[in-house]
Structure formats: structure tokens, C-alpha cells
């Protein structure tokens, strides 16, 4: 029995406003298209993301969950966590832009 190819998609968020905050150039439309095309061709889609990016609201997070629900036919597994502010990340290097204060 052949093994299904797998993809790991860094979804991050279902809200384009959050993509802009992150400096990403993708759109939800592109993500939907990639999920649908890969799924249709037998690829197992594992979608990864996180909640709590600086500036993300509760409504943004709910929108992300709804995006995944709306695309559930093409999302086969999900891995979500909370945003982790690492020491050398672009967010920390631009802390003021994101409203982060460091002590």
C-alpha cells in the first residue's frame, strides 16, 4: 500500500491583518488554494499555527479557527500552540513596533 505524501503548512493565522503584522506576503486565498490542490492530489495536509502573536485579538483567533473549519475537507491534522517570543526573533528586535517592553 503506497504511503500518502505529507505537507506541513505554516498557516500561522486565518486573518490577513495578522499576516501583515508578521511581514508575510501570503493571503488566505493562496492558503485555501494550496490546501485544496494538494489534498485533491492525495497529499496529507498538516496545518501548523499559533495564537497570541502581538496585536492578535480574540476575534482574530476565532477567525483562524473558523478558517480551519471552513477548509476542514482539505486539512487532515492540526498542530497549534501559543506564540513564543524568542531571543533573536524579528518581533523582539522590533519590540516597540509590537508594543512589547523589555526589562
Image (cartoon, grey):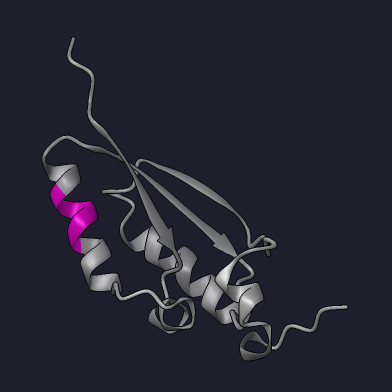
Is 34 covered by the magenta stretch? yes
Identity of the residue drawn at 56% across and 80% down: 59
Query: Is 10 rendered above or below residue 25?
Result: above
The stretch of residues the image draws in magenta is 33-37
Quarter of the C terminus within the rendering: bottom right
Magenta stretch prevailing secondary structure: helix
Quarter of the N terminus within the rendering: top left
Query: Is 63 rendered above or below residue 12?
Result: below
Compared across the picture, whether 35 is left or right of 101 comes to left
In percent of width and height, residue 58 lies at: 62, 78
Res. 100 image quadrant:
bottom right
Identity of the residue drawn at 29% across and 72% down: 26
In percent of width and height, residue 76 lies at: 35, 41
Compared across the picture, whether 24 is left or right of 31 comes to right
Compared across the picture, whether 89 is left or right of 10 comes to right
Q: Residue furthest top?
A: 1
Query: Is 59 rendered above or below residue 6?
Result: below
Identity of the residue drawn at 17% across and 46% down: 38
In percent of width and height, residue 64 lies at: 46, 68
Res. 83 image quadrant:
bottom right
Q: Residue furthest right?
A: 103
The foreground one among 55 and 39 is 55
Compared across the picture, whether 46 is left or right of 53 comes to left
Identity of the residue drawn at 70% across and 62% down: 87
The tally of labels here is 0
Query: Is 78 rendered above or below residue 67?
Result: above
Amino acid at each position: 500500500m503506497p504511503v500518502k505524501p505529507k505537507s506541513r503548512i505554516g498557516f500561522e493565522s486565518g486573518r490577513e491583518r495578522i499576516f501583515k503584522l508578521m511581514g508575510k506576503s501570503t493571503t488566505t486565498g493562496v492558503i485555501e488554494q494550496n490546501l485544496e490542490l494538494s489534498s485533491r492530489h492525495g497529499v496529507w495536509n498538516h496545518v501548523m499555527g499559533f495564537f497570541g502573536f502581538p496585536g492578535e485579538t480574540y476575534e482574530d483567533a476565532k477567525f483562524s479557527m473558523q478558517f480551519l473549519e471552513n477548509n476542514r475537507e482539505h486539512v487532515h491534522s492540526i498542530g497549534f500552540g501559543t506564540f513564543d517570543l524568542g531571543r533573536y526573533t524579528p518581533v523582539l528586535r522590533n519590540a516597540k513596533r509590537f508594543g512589547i517592553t523589555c526589562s
